[in-house]
Amino acid sequence: MSLPLVTPAPEADALRRRSLRRMRTLALGLLVLAAVVYVATWGQGGFLGYVNAGAEASMVGAIADWFAVTALFRHPLGLPVPHTALIPRRKDDLGRGLEQFVGENFLQPEIISERVRSAEPTRRAGAWLAEPEHARRVVAEVSEVTAIALGKIEDRHIIELVEQVLVPRFAEEPIAPVLGTFVVEAVRDDLHHGVVDLAINELHDWLVVNHETFTEVIGERAPWWAPPRLNDAVTSRLHSEAVRWLADIRDDPGHRARAALDSLLARLGDDLLHDEATARRAEGLKLRLLEHPQFVSTGISLWQGLRNVLRDALAEPDGALATRLRDELVVVAGRLRDEPALQQRFDRVVSDAVVFVVDRYGTELTSVITQTIERWDGAEAAERIELHVGRDLQFIRINGTVVGGLVGLLIHALSQLL
């Protein structure tokens, strides 16, 4: 099945066709002029004899070059002369040759690497992105594409991901070593202190503000026979002691409760790593969580919340998220533009990436040339190629006419001298 050659710009092709027609007319006019001069000076001697010899050689050169140019695209005068209509008959060979030429001379790793680095892609990209208006355009495009992508992800896709990929994977992976290592490292580097401080502050502030809620909850646990006045006194005292105790823990980094929590976490991490009973309990808890119906529902709810927040944030061109992205992009772009060491590092990464792609897929890329040309219709391919290069090829005919005449004149002069 032949592949039609699509005309991308009919107006441009019409202009090429007119230009080709003018050059053909000029080349043919020179041939006709040489023929007229040859007939007019036939049998003359002296100076006209020289003119006649030059005109004769001009005709020979013009006809020979017309034959050579025409033979590329079709049979001259429709005659099936051997080695004519080269492009229609041998387009497949030409395609394979062009594929080899491109592969051997353009898709070499050394050439590509040098070309990419000389182009300075990092510096140029940084200079372009450092302009606030350009950064705004990039963030707007990325935000729009991200919002569209988020809209394309349906809840069923997340359900399938959780049920068919995440849950089986989490079920197979032992959690005790990972959790134990995390707890041990967190305690060793005091990473949990920030979380503890946040929890104590929030709990203290909540107790201070919600005195009535605390006393109601504690009062519900009081014996039925206890007098209400006694219950109120006890719950109020418990509230005061709880607030004071949390304040002491908050203000004293060396409080005994903090030390007890550190010891508890350290022992828990060690048990998760070395105690089989603790590891089994952790695995059992993990499996119960994964098998609970609410696990998938919770995952969907978290995804929906995250998606809605992101879509709402991306929908505001001058919102906090877009503004932060633009500011960070301008800062990073400024560093890429102004720091040569950073430019060299990123240029090397880009160069290596391009070389990897070409080295891995270069054959497939160049094979597109052969595969495409093989599917072209031979006659149409010849017509299209002639339309693009035929005008310049007419200069061969013109030069053949002029040079042939000069050579003929020189040969006639030498023959007269000898």
Image: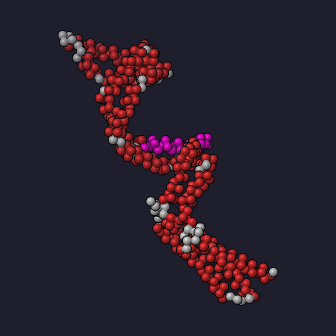
Is 249 situated left or right of 58 in this image? left
Of the pair 368 and 12, the residue shown nearer to us: 368
Magenta stretch: dominant secondary structure = helix
Q: Nearer the viewer, residue 91 or 270?
A: 91
Horizontal placement of 358 versus 247: left or right?
A: right
Q: How many marks?
A: 0
* x and y percentages locating residue 311 in the rendered image: 36, 42
- In the foreground, 410 or 124: 410
Residue stretch in magenta: 322-348
Q: Residue furthest right?
A: 418
Q: Nearer the viewer, residue 395 or 143?
A: 395
Q: Quadrant of the N terminus?
A: bottom left
Picture residue at 41% right of the left edge, 23% below the top: 175
Give x and y (percent) for residue 332. 53, 42
Left or right for 196, reference 102: left
Look at 51% across and 68% down and name the residue there.
Answer: 383
Say above or below: 4 vs 25. above
Which quarter of the image is occupied by the C terminus?
bottom right
Based on the picture, tell me whether residue 326 belongs to the magenta stretch.
yes
The residue depicted at 30 percent of the width and 32 percent of the height is 297
The colour scheme of the drawn protein is secondary structure
Q: Residue visible at 47% across and 19% down? A: 184
The stretch drawn in magenta includes residue 163: no
